[in-house]
Amino acid sequence: MNRVVLIGFMGAGKTTIGEKLATALGAEFIDSDAEIVKREGKSIPDIFTTQGEEAFRQMETELLRELASGNEALVLSCGGGMPVRDINRTLLKKIGTVVYLKADKETIYGRVAGDTNRPLLKAEDLKARIHELFTAREDIYLDAKNVEVDASREVTEVLADILKALEG
Ligand code: S3P
């Protein structure tokens, strides 16, 4: 399978792993956030502030629609909220094998603390916010995925697991 989609919570490592996976598979790499930022000429926080979250979600859906109509080798790393819309879960599976990078909440906290580029994590109590969002999304990720990988470990281990899962 040379079309792979990475989903998971913020801080799960989707971009880092996606780049390496694309190299390993000889596939094009697209990061949905980076692609939207490039097209809009605005940062994610700017899009959220000036156009709102719904407009951003619509941009995500439009990108998926485009990618679902192609068939070139591709690794797509998705923003953490991509699978929340029902239509997106359908489109993601149409694009390729959906791999859920599942990281535990402590790992996520360690990776996103201090980051100012994620509007949904602007909170007085970051741990509580992560818990709230993580709980709301856990079943959604499980519903969206074809394969699940433990992403709380080192990048090389996660990558090896994904490659093994894709073979089998
Ligand atoms: C979001 C995750 C972000 C980005 C936006 C919203 C979310 O991407 O798309 O801030 O709803 O979980 P990362 O998962 O790459 O941080």
Image (cartoon, grey):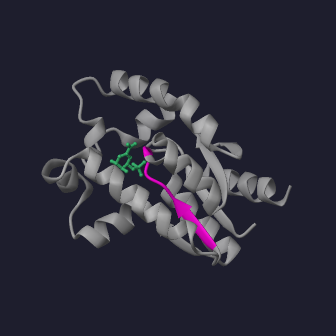
In the shown orientation, is residue 20 left or right of residue 128? Answer: right
Residue at the (56%, 55%) spot, across then down: 91
Residue 52 locus on image (x, y percent)? 20, 47
Which quarter of the rendered picture does the C terminus lie within? bottom right
- Quadrant (top left, top right, bottom left, bottom right) of the N terminus: bottom right
Asked where in the image residue 141 lies, by quadrant, the reply is: top right
* Residue 85, x across and y down, in percent: 45, 43
Decide if residue 90 is on the left or right side of residue 134. Answer: right
Residue 140 in sight in this render: yes
Viewer-closest of 3 and 16: 3
Instruction: Give the x, y percent position of residue 45.
Output: 21, 51
Q: Residue at x 63, y 35 (%)?
A: 142
Is residue 100 rendered to the left or right of residue 8? Answer: right
Q: Which residues are magenta?
A: 74-81
- Number of marks in the rendered image: 0
Quarter of the image for residue 42 reads: bottom left
